[in-house]
Image (cartoon, rainbow, N blue to C red):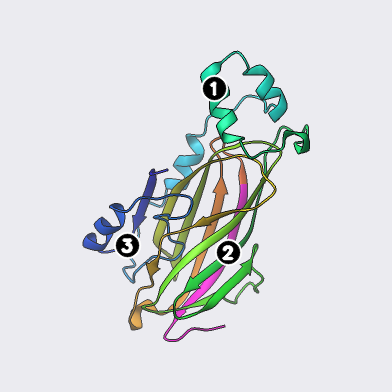
Amino acid sequence: MDNAENKSALPKNEEEEKQNSGISRKNSEASLLSMDTNEEDDDGNEEEDDEKNVVVPGPQVALKEQLEMDKDDESLRRWKETLLANVDLSEVGENPDPLVTIMNLTISSPERADLVLPIPFQSGSNSAAFVLKDGSKYCLKFNVTVHNNIVSGLRYTNTVWKKGIRVDYKKVMLGTFSPQKDAYVIELEEETTPSGFLARGYYTAKTKFADDDGKCYLEMDYAFEIKKDWGR
């Protein structure tokens, strides 16, 4: 889970520091909102390239059927047994398609109480879903549920624009997840919002969760603001 692409408008020395940190389900290099005020545009074609490179998958097979098919492949069988160690197969349905739900986002900061936002965000078309204080430390946590089948190569992408110009792009491979009752908590690494007058203002963004097969589980447009003080 150390595979991440990060094309942002951050200064070079700050960018290098980010690239030296690893990612995991609980600690991720990805930041939903880790941009500065450099409004230098680039080609913006990463997401299009991802879609072009998706391999067309074969038909999905229900989890129980997979285990039966793989019983003669010892290495594959052991890998799946490890992955499914906490799965009650009696409760796994016959639907072959994984059901992945991104339930909510929690924004945590030592400067304020946690802000929990149901997904999709409840905000008007021209209003910000949340406010961040400039120069503040924060981290993000996504609660994600997985049912029916294994989801392979779940990845997170986030793109941010200010005044129509792209200022940040993140792509992070989150990993493979087995179905289970309880939600997974995907905690991202602590970040610091940019500071200063130029950093403040209104931003638009798009978040997407998809798997190795190109199946999209969430694609959400929203807006947020960076202000001098914490908002609601």
Magenta part, dominant SS: strand
- Distance from the alpha carbon under mark 2 to that under mark 3: 24 Å
Q: Quadrant of the N terminus?
A: top left
Outermost residue to the top = 72
- The question of residue 163 being in magenta is answered with no
The answer to which quarter of the image holds residue 18 is bottom left
The residue at 45%/86% (across/down) is 229
The residue tagged with tag 2: helix, strand or loop? strand
- Distance from the alpha carbon under mark 1 to that under mark 3: 42 Å
The magenta span reads 217-232
The answer to which quarter of the image holds residue 71 is top right
Relative image position of residue 59 (x, y in whole percent):
67, 25
- The question of residue 222 being in magenta is answered with yes
> Label 3, on which residue?
9
The residue at 51%/34% (across/down) is 54
The residue tagged with tag 3: helix, strand or loop? loop
Please tell me whether residue 129 is drawn above or below residue 209 in the rendered image. below
| Amino acid type of the residue that numbered disc 3 sits on in the rendered structure | Ala
Please tell me whether residue 80 is drawn above or below residue 131 in the rendered image. above
| Amino acid type of the residue that numbered disc 2 sits on in the rendered structure | Leu
Relative depth, front residue between 69 and 119: 69
| Amino acid type of the residue that numbered disc 1 sits on in the rendered structure | Leu
Mark 2 and mark 3 lie on one chain; the one further toward the N terminus is 3
Please tell me whether residue 43 is drawn above or below residue 193 in the rendered image. above
Mark 1 and mark 3 lie on one chain; the one further toward the N terminus is 3
Q: Quadrant of the C terminus?
A: bottom right
> Label 1, on which residue?
76
The answer to which quarter of the image holds residue 147 is top right
